[in-house]
Every structure is written in structure tokens, then in C-alpha cells.
Amino acid sequence: MSFIESDERKQLRAAVAQLAAKYNFRDYAGPKARRNEPLDELWADAGKLGFLGVNLPEEYGGGGAGIYELALVMEELAAQGCGLLLMVVSPAICGTIITKYGTDEQKQNWLPRLADGSAKMVFGITEPDAGSNSHKITTTARRDGEDWILNGRKVFISGVDQAEAVLIVARTENAKTGNLQPALFIVPVDTPGFVKTKQEMDIIEPDNQFTLFLDDVRLPANALVGKEDAAIAQLFAGLNPERIMGAAMAAGMGRYAIDRAVEYAKERTVWKGVPIGAHQGISHPLAQVKIEVELAKLMMQKAAVLYDSGDDFGAAEAANMAKYAAAEASIKALDQALQTHGGSGLTRDVSLAGMLAAARIGRVAPVSREMVLNFVAQHSLGLPRSY
Ligand SMILES: Cc1cc2nc3c(=O)[nH]c(=O)nc-3n(C[C@H](O)[C@H](O)[C@H](O)COP(=O)(O)OP(=O)(O)OC[C@H]3O[C@@H](n4cnc5c(N)ncnc54)[C@H](O)[C@@H]3O)c2cc1C
């Protein structure tokens, strides 16, 4: 493993940064988020430039690279305040799972369109009565001849209004309760019995969350991705990339916050011609968050390297740690950037307060801070499980 990025990766970083500059927070992403409008123009351009499908196989129109590169794209967008939340679900989770476990027909139908951004597929696992405990999900799939019938409820599913389909995590009806035996289904959003309702969130974000009701949703046999008793490995093929992408979005937001704070700390002067950045009460906390964001980014890169090399198990620990570290670092960085701005940090014009609330999503989703700590306590430290 090298700590020096290849020229190819550096070039990708520069190209994404150039696109992000066009769709930066102040001029584009911020006003869009306040209007609660998806970043469609950025999504379309990123798709045309091959950034959204950079991790998907070349034979299906992707870039043939890995999650490292997809995370790099996300980080560079988020570093200019225009991270794309649905990259976490469409190319990272759904694209990966279909690539690894989909039929040829599913690959041909979906991967080229996920890669160029012309179609989005979102991801639904969370349920009102299961929450962090995915083993308790009750959305069930039962056979009816060749077809499948799905019934259940989901909550907090991002981007359903923009998507052509949702990859739904269900359990087969006759699977024993207890440990989850997930079965994954591609559910087109226009299927009869599929009802979405927007959830009113109190965050400034371009993308919306939805509750879903699946009421006798009838699907053809080819809606199933992989095996019906696919076991947890198939699900984890998507969840590790999800955590790495969550870390990338947070690390990028942390960079954005530090850049804004440093700019201001260099120019704002209130004592004897010295900029506030000269006071260690301002510079040290910024240096500290810079270190924390960089460390989180390193762990994210380690997770991506492990994942791309096929070590799903090793990647799980690193991906959890990276998601934790990046979310915490970005929240702290935004809070410190806000403090650096004094009163203007709380103005609409500076927009750091709204972004701080959005950064807190990373502490809860895709897996909460506490569940990551549980994972590390149990798997990394070998401590007993309390739940
Ligand atoms: C903006 C946003 C977008 C989302 N997008 C999606 C999406 O696209 N698809 C999807 O499927 N889901 C999505 N989610 C759901 C997200 O993954 C869940 O909110 C998250 O996994 C936590 O589940 P919960 O909200 O039910 O919290 P709960 O599980 O009810 O937990 C509540 C609190 O208790 C803590 N807790 C629970 N169990 C334990 C324990 N054993 N030990 C210690 N503490 C514990 C949690 O950490 C948390 O702090 C999204 C959520 C948000 C906020």
C-alpha cells in the first residue's frame, strides 16, 4: 500500500474539483438545498463525465476502478459543499450489489444507466420497528407461483422521488426469525401497492426522505437480486461501500468547513491590525480539526483499499471506524468554523449553521455512532455484547 496517490487518482481529484467549483455551495448547492431541490444539473454533469460510475465495470459503461475512486469523487464534491447524498446509495450500494450478485439481465438493464447517472436506484433497509437492529426487519417476501409478493414498511429512505427503483431489503416469509436472512428485491417505484410519503425533516438538504408502504407489491421472479437466502455477505457487499461513502462525504464537509474558517481567520481583524487567525484560541482548534479530518480520511482510504482488494471482513472494521471518525471530525470542524466566524457564523449568508445540522446526519446514518462503538467494542476489542 502506498500513501502517495497515483497520477491517475490525482488527475481524477483535479477534474472533480473543477466540476465542484462550478457547482459550489455558495452559488449552487446551498441555494438549491434551501429550496429542498435535488442537485440535478450536477448529477447529470457528473454522470456524463464518468464520475458517478467510476467504480462500476467497464463492460457495463463504468470506469472499472473501485470504491477508492468513488469515495474520492464524493470527497472532492463535498469539499466544495456539493456532496451528492445519492451517490452513497445508487452507484455505491446498489451498483456494487448488482455487479457482484445480479443476473446478466439485471446488470445490462441497470449498470450502464447507474453509471451515466440517467437512472437512480435507492436503498431501503430501515424500518420503524427495527431501526439499528436490522435483524428485526419484518418486510416479507412470499412466493406466488413465479412471482414474489412483498409486504412491509420502511422509513427514512432517501431520494425515492428521484429514483426509478428501490433496492428493498426483505426477509423471505419462511426464513426463521432471529438472525436476518436478507433477500434483496429491485422494486420499481411505479409498482402497484408501493406508496411513498415524504417525511418532513428539520435539516437543510437537497434530497428528501420517505416512508414506504409495500402493500401486496407483486414482482416478477427476476426482481430478486442474488439468492433468496443470500446471507449477510451479500448485504455487506453494499454496506461497506455505504460506510466508506458516508466517511467520504463527511471528510469533504470537514475540509469545506476548515477552508471557510481559515479564509475568514486570515482576513478578519479586530485587535491592532492582527487577523484573528493569529490568536491561538482560534488557530489551535482549527489545527486540531485539520488533524482529525486528515486522520479520518486516512482510515477511509484504508477501508477503501481493503474493500477493493476483496477483504470484506477487514474492510468492515476500517469502514466503521472511518465513518465514525469522519462524522465526528466534520461536526467538530463545522462547529469550529462557525465559532471562528463569531456572530456572522450564524447568518444565512455564511450558511455554516445549516450545514452543521446536515453534518449531524453522519452521526446517525447509515449506522449510528453508538452502533459503530458497539461493533468496535465487540469485534476489535473482544468485549461482550450488551444487546
Ligand atoms: C437523513 C437520513 C437519511 C437516511 N437514508 C436512509 C436510506 O436511504 N435508506 C435506509 O435504509 N435508511 C436510511 N436512513 C436511516 C438510518 O440508517 C437510521 O436512522 C439509522 O440506522 C438509525 O436507526 P434509527 O433511526 O431507527 O435509530 P434507533 O435504532 O431507534 O436508535 C436510536 C438511538 O439509540 C441508539 N442505540 C440503538 N441501539 C443501541 C445499542 N444496542 N447500544 C447503544 N445505543 C443504541 C442509536 O445509536 C441511536 O442513538 C437515513 C436516516 C437519515 C437521518
Image (spheres, rainbow, N blue to C red):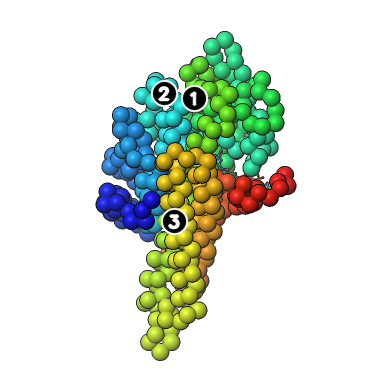
Q: Secondary structure at mark 1?
A: strand
Three-letter amino acid code at disc 2? Gln
Three-letter amino acid code at disc 3? Leu
Assess disc 2: are there few (<14), some (14-19) or many (≥20) residues with their C-alpha within 10 Å of its C-alpha. Answer: some
Q: Position of residue 244 (x, y in %)?
A: 47, 47
Assess disc 1: are there few (<14), some (14-19) or many (≥20) residues with their C-alpha within 10 Å of its C-alpha. Answer: many
Q: Secondary structure at mark 2?
A: helix
Q: CA distance from mark 3 to mark 2?
A: 34 Å
Q: Residue at position x 45%, y 71% from top?
A: 287
Q: Where is residue 80, by image quadrant?
A: bottom left
Three-letter amino acid code at disc 1? Val
Mark sitting earlier along the chain (3/2): 2
Q: Position of residue 164 (x, y in %)?
A: 44, 30
Q: Secondary structure at mark 3?
A: helix
Mark sitting earlier along the chain (1/2): 2
Mark sitting earlier along the chain (3/1): 1
Residue 386 vs residue 28, the one in the foreground:
386
Instruction: Tell me the mark number nearer the camera, choosing from 3 and 1.
Output: 3
**Ligand 1 lies in quarter:** top right
Quarter the C terminus occupies? top right
Q: CA distance from mark 1 to mark 2?
A: 8 Å
Q: Position of residue 278 (x, y in %)?
A: 42, 81
Q: Residue furthest bottom?
A: 272
Residue receiving disc 2: 106
97 displayed left or right of 144: left
Q: Position of residue 223 (x, y in %)?
A: 49, 21
Residue receiving disc 1: 225
Residue receiving disc 3: 298
Assess disc 3: are there few (<14), some (14-19) or many (≥20) residues with their C-alpha within 10 Å of its C-alpha. Answer: some
